[in-house]
Image (tube, rainbow, N blue to C red):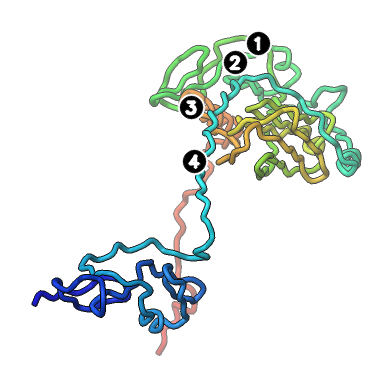
Amino acid sequence: MAVQLCYNRGCGQQYDIRKNTGEGEAACRHHPGDPYFHDAYKGWSCCQNKSTDFTTFLNTPGCSTGKHSNVKPLNPEKITGNLTKEVEEVVETRPPIQPEATRPPADSPLVRLKPTVAASLVQAVAAIPQPTGEEEGGEAVVTEGEACKNNGCKAAYSKEVASSQCTRHPGYPVFHEGMKYWSCCQRKTTEFQQFMDQEGCDLGSHKWVADKTGTEVQCRYDWHQTATHVTVAVYAKKYDPETSYLELSPVRLVIHLVFPAENNNTFHLDLQLKGVVEVDGAVASMLGTKLELKMKKAESCSWAKLDIPKVVSKEEKEKKEALNLVEMANAAPLVDALDLDDLDLTPQGFQLSDAAKTKVV
């Protein structure tokens, strides 16, 4: 007798292939639907019989009769929720990708902004005392023996020397591949002292007062962003709102602050912005403890950083390092030569003390 196992859901009995007519006592009683599990209930989709007990669910008799089958049914998809509710098919479409906008050129014209000045800043600047005693008649006072600030000139200030010509190097120092020379005359040498002792190649007037660089002030600045705006804050106090300014282009930001209390030294910030902004939507405020600038983004996107770092060429880096070395050498104090004849090198005789000479018995 050929006997096989029925794979219909809810049956699981063995049947005789020759007597598989689907009628009478040999008929297969099974669930033609699929099982579903929802809200702790377990049931069949064909008869809506459901129970919270898993054993009761498995022992639920089939709701339909027919022939036995030795073919395993396919596993259905997970059925949840109300089976009588019609499911509407929702097709999600991806929004079209917007092409990236053209970035304005880096040399776009700058627009000077008109910031709002706080009363606390105006009062703080007005309370700064005026400088006295250092300048007379608009000209700096030069003391006797002051060295000339021109490169290559070794003259010291006096009434006789003040009217003489200055022998100087009008160029800048160059240090390249071990060689040291001035860009104006290019007399190359490998020794730094020989380079510093080179006589000037041009005649001109002495310069007894060094130029003010205006970059000595260091200010901390920070930034943050939202979906639509970027805010930059420079933390500074007692800067002059009349001579300080802000300039902005779609891709560049310039902030210049002047500090009257520090000999009108300045803080200068020049950044090439990472993103693009709308100049018309920028709002600036000069407060007592900081300067704040709020810029509107031209595109609603996140900035990875505030600015694009500037690429410094090798020549500019070497020129800056050479200028720093020359300034340090000029600022170093001169040490007088030591005369060995002034030293007392007479050998000193050492003798025992009276206590050491006493013989112990």
The residue labelled by disc 3 is: 318
Is mark 1 in CB contact (under 8 Å) with mark 3? no
Q: Quadrant of residue 47?
A: bottom left
Q: Secondary structure at mark 2?
A: strand
Amino acid marked by disc 2: Arg
**From this viewpoint, is residue 56 visible?**
yes
Residue 177 location in percent, x, y?
38, 25
Marks 2 and 4, how far apart in space?
Answer: 35 Å
The residue at 46%/80% (across/down) is 51
Quadrant of the frame with the N terminus: bottom left
Q: Secondary structure at mark 3?
A: helix
Residue 324 location in percent, x, y?
56, 31
Q: Secondary structure at mark 1?
A: strand
Left or right: 11, with 119 as reference point: left
**From this viewpoint, is residue 145 visible?**
no
Marks 1 and 3, how far apart in space?
Answer: 27 Å
Q: Does 292 sit above or below residue 70?
A: above
